Image: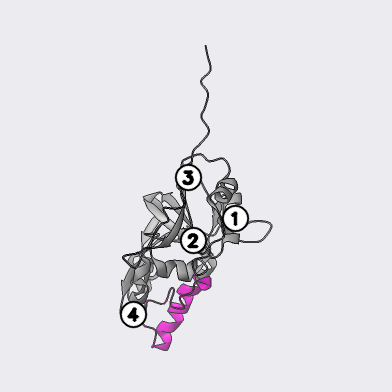
Amino acid sequence: MRLHYYMTTAMWAEVILKERRLKLSRFYEANDPFELNLIDSRDPNRRKIVKMIESYHNERTGMICFGATWDNPMMWAHYADKHAGVCLGFEVDDKLLSTVHYTDEKIDVEFGSHLANHGLSAELLSKVLTTKSTAWAPEQERRALAALETPDPKNGLYYTDFGPQLQLRAVIIGYRCGWTVAKAVDLLGQVTAPVRISKARPAFGRFAMVEQRQVRPVTVRPPKVSKKRS
C-alpha cells in the first residue's frame, strides 16, 4: 500500500535518507494525549487497569504513523514544519499495517476475575492501540506496530530499516522547503527501486496540495545491471 510519512523538518529528512531507516515512536511521545486511553476510566479501579495497559505498551510497543495521502495541507502544517519540511512516500507491506479507527466516545468495559483474562481480550487491546478521537480523522492514519526489541547502541532509540517491506518510492518537497530537486537527488543517492522527486504547492482551485508543474519532477532509478557475455 502506498502511504506517506510527513517529516517534521527537512533536516530530519536528510538524516532518514542518509540512514535509510524510520524511527519507531513511543506512544507517550505522540501529540495526542489520549493515545492508549480509549477506555472510560472515571472509575478508580478501572483507571488502574488503563494505566497498566499504558505502561505495558509505552515500554514494549513502537509505531510508525503514516497518512493515506500527501495532499492534505493540514498534515503539512502539523507534521512537516508548516510546509517547510518533506513528505516521504512508501510502499508498505499490508501485513505490517493497522488502520486507525475514529470514535466520538470512550468505551465502557467490564473487568474482573470472573471474565477470561480479566476482560483484557486481544480484540480490546487491538482497539486500544488503533482507535483515536474523530478530531484526528482527517489524518486517515495507518500504523505499523512493532515490538521494541533492539535499541540503537548509539542513541538508545528503535528503528525499522528500509527494505522489501518498507520501500521508499517518493520524495515530496514542501512548498516552503528550501530544497531543490537536485539537492534531493543528491541526498537520495543510489536506490534499489524507482523514487519520484517532486515539489508541492497549494492548488489554485481547491484546498489541497498539488505538484508544482514549474519544477520538473525527477525519477531516480536503480543502476542498470550489465549482462555478462558468455
* Image spot of residue 32 (x, y percent): 45, 75
Task: Pick whichever, 96 or 133, lies toward us.
Answer: 133
Q: Nearer the viewer, mark 4 or mark 3?
A: 3
Residue 106: image tag = 4
> Do labels 4 and 2 touch, CB within 8 Å?
no
Numbered disc 4: secondary structure: loop
Residue 121 in sight: no
Query: Along the line of sight, which residue is nearer the eye, 162 or 34?
Result: 162
Image quarter for residue 71?
A: bottom left
Q: Residue at x 40, y 83 (%)?
A: 46
Which residue is at the front of the view, 23 or 77?
77
Q: Is residue 185 magenta?
A: no
At mark 3, the secondary structure is strand
Instruction: Indicate the amino acid at tag 4.
Output: Lys
- Sequence-first tag of 4 and 2: 4
Q: Position of residue 69 (x, y in %)?
A: 37, 59
Please name which of the two marks, 1 or 4, marks the residue nearer to the observer: 1
Residue beneath label 3, please?
218
Q: Does the residue at mark 3 contact the one at mark 2 (Cβ under 8 Å)?
A: no
As helix, strand or loop, the secondary structure at mark 2 comes to: loop
Q: Are marks 3 and 1 in contact (CB under 8 Å)?
A: no
Question: In the rendering, at what x and y percent does residue 84 appear?
Answer: 53, 65
Relative vertical location of residue 85 with respect to residue 162 in this rendering, above or below: below
In the image, which is nearer the foreground, mark 4 or mark 2?
2
Depicted 86 relative to depicted 77: above or below? above
Q: Residue at x 58, y 50 (%)?
A: 183
Query: Looking at the image, which residue sits at the far front?
Result: 214
Is residue 65 visible in the rendered image? The answer is yes
Magenta span: 28-57
Q: On the image, numbered disc 1 is attached to which residue?
A: 14
Q: Amino acid at mark 1?
A: Glu
Q: CA distance from mark 4 to mark 3?
A: 46 Å
